[in-house]
Amino acid sequence: MATKDREYVDYKDTEFLQRFINEQGKLLPRRVTGVSAKMQRQITRAVKRARHLALLPFVDDAMR
């Protein structure tokens, strides 16, 4: 999952963040996504912010 063209991960870009979340709504590890540690921290922070603002769900609807 190429993120080389990005220097900052925005929490409002939910389509981009969906690529780093599995079916259950869990974050994918960086060994699976292939991003750097710095980018993984930015993605994690952005996903948590998007969940807090209800832009992304905490869990998938099928898991409820």
Image (cartoon, rainbow, N blue to C red):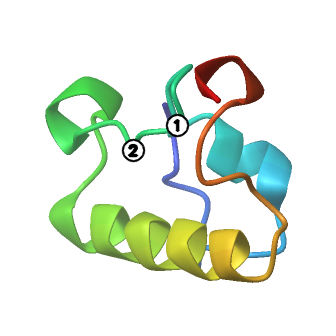
Q: Which amino acid does label 1 sit on?
A: Ile
The location of residue 7, given as percent across then percent down, is 54, 77
| Residue 64 vertical position relative to residue 51 in the rendered view, above or below | above
Q: Earlier in the sequence, mark 1 or mark 2?
A: 1
Q: Residue at x 67, y 31 (%)?
A: 60
At horizontal 31% and vertical 47% (from top left) the residue drawn is 35
Q: Name the residue under label 2.
A: 27
Q: Which of 7 and 33 is in front in this view?
A: 33
- Residue 11 picture location, percent across and down: 71, 76
How far separated are the C-alphas under marks 1 and 2? Answer: 5 Å
16 and 45: which one is in front?
45
Q: Tell me which corner region of the image, top left, top right, bottom left or bottom right, holds residue 49.
A: bottom right
Residue type for callout 2:
Leu
Residue that badge 1 annotates: 21
Left or right: 60 in relation to 24 = right
Say which residue appears at 50% left-offset and 25% top-offset.
22
Asked if residue 18 lies left or right of residue 12, the reply is left
The reply to whether dot 1 and dot 2 touch (C-beta < 8 Å) is yes
Mark 2 residue element: loop
Q: In which quarter of the image is residue 27?
A: top left
Which quadrant holds the C terminus?
top right
Rendering coords of residue 54 (x, y %): 82, 70
Q: Report the front residue among 47 and 16.
A: 47
Q: Where is residue 45 in the image (x, y as percent from the top left)?
A: 45, 79
